[in-house]
Image: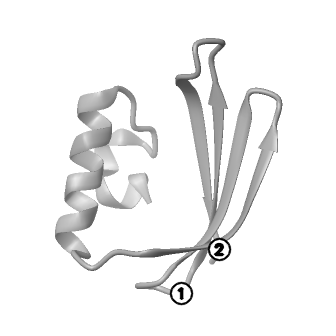
Amino acid sequence: MAARLKPESNGIIEGKPAVRDYWQLGISRIPDLHFQLIDLLVGVQSLTVYYVNTATGKRSVENMFFTAEGKVSRAFVNYSL
């Protein structure tokens, strides 16, 4: 999705300001954006959220990896076709 919304990013959004801009752009395009949680999976210093975007009906999986301080260090998102 990042590659579609912000082609200059090559699909990678880094830093709080860039993430904020990305979400503001997405919400401006789909103001009633909602997600339906399918499952939440927990691992060692990681979390996976499996959900449906209710606006599109598409399923997504977000994988987040945390530092020892509990901050997200990396995140990967995969979307159904």
Give coordinates of residue 10: x percent, y percent. 42, 42
Q: Which residue is mark 2?
A: 80
Above-or-below relation of 6 to 27: above
Question: Three-letter amino acid code at disc 1?
Answer: Gly
Above-or-below relation of 66 to 60: above
The crowd level at tag 1 (other Cα within 10 Å; few <14, some 14-19, many 20+) is: few
The answer for how far apart the CA atoms under marks 1 and 2 are is 10 Å
Residue at left offset 26%, top offset 76%: 30
> Which circle, 1 or 2, is nearer the viewer?
1
Of residues 23 and 45, the one drawn nearer to the viewer in this rendering:
45
Q: Quadrant of the C terminus?
A: bottom right
Residue at left offset 53%, top offset 87%: 57
Q: Which residue is mark 1?
A: 57
Choose the circle earlier in sequence order: 1 or 2: 1
Question: Three-letter amino acid code at disc 2?
Answer: Ser
The secondary structure type at the circle numbered 2 is loop
Give coordinates of residue 19: x percent, y percent. 32, 39
Task: Locate residue 20: give its quadrant.
Answer: top left
Of residues 44 and 5, the one drawn nearer to the viewer in this rendering:
44
Task: Locate residue 36: give its quadrant.
Answer: bottom right
Give coordinates of residue 66: x percent, y percent. 63, 25
The secondary structure type at the circle numbered 1 is loop
The crowd level at tag 2 (other Cα within 10 Å; few <14, some 14-19, many 20+) is: few
